[in-house]
Image (spheres, helix red, strand yellow):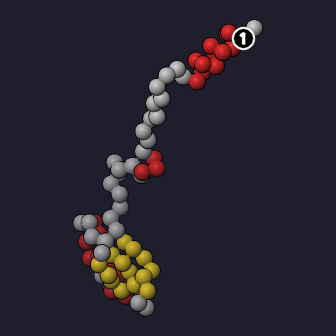
Amino acid sequence: MKTVTFSEFRKNASGVLDLVEKGESFRVLRHGKAIARIGPAQRRGARLAWKRAGLRLVVAGASLSRAVLKERRSSP
């Protein structure tokens, strides 16, 4: 990650953003302290991890609903 001061970023924002578009990341400093990170945006097709479908849990044996129905039928 490259570092750029806020004043340098203001003077050359177009150039910095061109590099970001090519995949570079920058940390912007003001008075020696980091105030921002600038990096490439996610691709349109990429999905956030929390939006992706998770793994389905498969348990061997009868399903709970079938077990409940069987129990109800066998009760007087």
Q: Where is residue 67 in the image (x, y as percent from the top left)?
A: 60, 19
Residue 52 figure quarter: top left
Question: Who's the residue at 33% across and 54% down the image?
Answer: 43
Residue 55 figure quarter: top left
Left or right: where 32 falls relative to 74? left
Left or right: where 58 falls relative to 14? right
Pointer 1 local density, CA inside 10 Å: few below 14, some 14–19, many at least 20: few
Q: What residue type is labelled 1?
A: Ser
Residue at disc 1, secondary structure: loop
> In this orientation, which residue lies closer to the viewer: 8 or 64?
64
Is residue 14 at all visible to an observer of this figure?
no
Q: Is residue 17 above or below residue 65?
A: below
Q: Where is residue 10 in the image (x, y as percent from the top left)?
A: 36, 83
Is residue 40 at all visible to an observer of this figure?
yes
Question: Who's the residue at 43% across and 91% down the image?
Answer: 31
Left or right: where 5 falls relative to 22? right
Q: Position of residue 1 (x, y in %)?
A: 30, 75
Find disc 1 in the rendering and name its residue.
Answer: 75
For the C terminus, the quadrant is top right
> In this orientation, which residue lies closer to the viewer: 22 or 34?
34
